[in-house]
Structures are given as structure tokens and as C-alpha cells.
Amino acid sequence: MTLERIDLLRVVVADDEEDVRLVLAMQLDAVEGITVVGDAADGAEAIDLCRDLRPDAVVMDLLMPNVNGFEAIERLRSEQPDLGIVAYTGVAGEFVRTEMERLGVPLVLKSGDASALVEALRRVTVHD
Amino acid sequence: MVAGAQAGASGTTAVGEAERLDAIRRRILNVVGHELRTPVTTIRGLAESLDTADAQAIRSTIAPALVRNTRRLERLLDDLLIASGITTALPVDLPEVVAPAPLARETWARLADAVGGADLEIVSDAPDVDAVEALIPPASLRSALERVFENALRYGEPPFRLEITRTPDAVRLTLDTPGAALHREEIQLALEPFFRGEQAVMTHPGLGLGLSVAQALLDRADGRVWVEDRPGGGLVTVLEVPAL
């Protein structure tokens, strides 16, 4: 088994809060080796963007209008099995934890410090 | 023995009630935590970017976002206090003659602009809707309208329609908001603090305080708020305020 690390992570961020998208883009673009290539305001936009841009990873909020993050994750998982997905949420109750565990998606609590998110992005984009 | 059995049943009831209250406490803390987390983490992220951001980005992007998120925290604080029956957060202005139609028009335009725009049709059986007057603290009516309109813009679908009518003692503002069909229980609980509809929980963050805050604001001003089921789906929200 060989591990290959992708040098420049191309990331899509999906959150219905404009200011959260703004901060995520600033935080992730400031990290060497990561670039935010697009942002989406709901799950449907996130699916479309991932189809168009084929990013390495998506940071997905869960509570979003139209198509919520739970549904978007399931659809992206089946369409793009190699896409790294990180759930990024302000709510991590039992339902959320169980669902993300079932889907095999790491869960990161929204924080002003992006280090946990960056670490999760690195983890989900390391492929066999 | 009978007394013992009664004491046992009473103890079981008390335990059940304590568990129910604990569940409510946890639910409230959970939604408050979530609503606090987003602006707080956003403010921290923005503040930490100040070191590396250029002056133009600070002026055009970061500073306005900091203001938006601190306003959101202020609003959250007010809503929590008002919905909890703490009167210190209620507006302090006195009743004045207010024309609800222009106030509703201005309030809707401001809120709708922030979410990409949506029209509100204002209708009335009065010859000149702008001449219909109420006697109410303007800040209370404005704040109540804000909560009701935000609710409509967030969960409803156009066309939005506000009907303003006069009764002998009151001015009634009836907002018709088409949208998803709601269960009867959701209609009954819509004014309960921290209650959120089944669909709303999965699609939008929020505290579930908007309508209950509107109710608290108008109660204080001798008005009232109620909701009705809307045939075809959605909600009808009625604000009634004292007439001049």
C-alpha cells in the first residue's frame, strides 16, 4: 500500500451563511497547499459545483436550505467516491454524530481556529 | 399501602416532569449554543485575519462582516431576554401615532434586500392604506414586523401579501405566506419560544424565537399576534395593534 499526498488541495466550501463562507475562504486560502476553488450556499449548489470543478474535497455545512448537507453528502458520496468530504457544523448532537459515523465523514465543529478543519481535510484527501 | 402507592406514583410523575424539563433545558442550550457559535466563530476568524489582510480588504469586506456579526449577537441577546419575559430588553419608547403601511413597506424592503429581493403586496379595504393609523410604540411594531417578515422570507415562498384592515378598536395586519404544508401541531406551537417546525430544523439554523418575540413585543403594547393555517400550505400571521 502506498500513500499519496495531494500537493495542492482544491476545496469547495458549502455553507448557507455568507460570512462563514467568507471566513472559511480566508482561513483555508491562507494555508499553504490549500486553495478554495468555489463556494456554495446550499447542498444543491455544492453538488453542482463539485460536478463542474471536481475538487479534491468539500467542506459541508449540514443545516442548509433546498438540499441539506446530509442529503448532499450522500449524493456526492455515490457520484464521486474519491471526493474528500468534511462535515462542518455548529451542531453536533447525537443524530449528527451517528449519521456522520454511518457515512464515514469526519465531523468538525465550527471554530474560529481552522486547524482541526485543515487536519480533517488533509486526512480525507489521502488516498490508498 | 394505598398512601404508599400514591406517593410512589407521585414520585414517578415528579421524576418524569424533571426529565421533561431537563430535555427542554438541553434543547434550549443546544439551539442557543448553535446560534452563538456561528457569529462568535466568524468574528474570531475575521479578527485573526486582520494581521495579514490588506487595508482595502479590511475596509470593504472584513469590517462590514464584523459589524454584521456583532449586530447578530446583539439581536440574539435581545431575543433571548424578550422571549424569556425579561422586560429590560423591551423597547422603551412610548405609544405614538404610527402608519403601519409605510413602516411595513420600509421594513420589508430592508429585509428582502438582504436576501436577494422579494416583493410584498400591501392591500387594504381603506381608500388610502398609508392613512391607516395605529397607536403603538414605533420600535415595538418595527421589531415585531421584522421578526414576522424574517420568518416569512426564510420559510415562505412568493407571492407575499399583507392586508391591513381597520376594526373598531384595532388595526389588523394579516401576512399571507405561501409555503410548505404545516402539521396542525406546528401551527399550534408556532408562538412557543424555541419551537421550530419539522422542515425548518433540517434546513435552517435558528432559535425558534421570532414569532414569540413578536408576541411579547405586541403584548406589551396592548396588541397581539396569532397564526392560522393557510389553505394550500404556508402560514397566515396576524398582528393586531391598537387603533388611533
Image (spheres, coloured by chain):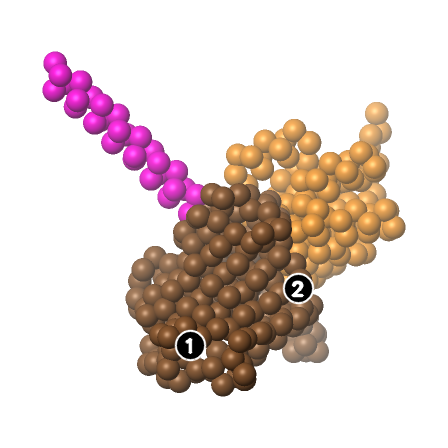
Chain colours: A orange, B brown
Tell me where residue B162 appears, x and y as whole percent: 56, 69
The amino acid type of the residue labelled 1 equals: Ala
The residue at which mark 1 appears reads as: B139
Query: Image height check: is B93 above or below A76?
Result: below
- Helix, strand or loop status at disc 2: loop
Q: Residue at x 65, y 59 (%)?
A: B157
In this orientation, which residue lies closer to the viewer: B74 or A110?
Answer: B74
Tell me if A38 is positioned left or right of A101 in this view: right
Query: Image height check: is B172 above or below A35?
Result: below
Q: Residue at x 80, y 34 (%)?
A: A78
Instruction: Let me know if marks 2 and 1 both belong to one chain.
Output: yes
The residue at which mark 2 appears reads as: B159
In this orientation, which residue lies closer to the viewer: B203 or B237?
Answer: B237
Q: Residue at x 57, y 62 (%)?
A: B176
Quadrant for the C terminus of chain B in the image: bottom left
Tell me where residue B67 appears, x and y as whole percent: 55, 72
- Other-residue count near label 1 (Cα within 10 Å), few / some / many at <14 / 14–19 / ≥20: some
**Which residue is situated farthest in the top direction here?**
B1
Q: Which SS does the magenta portion mostly show?
A: helix
The amino acid type of the residue labelled 2 equals: Pro
The magenta stretch is B1-28
Query: Image height check: is A124 above or below B39?
Result: above
Tell me where residue A121 appears, x and y as whole percent: 72, 44
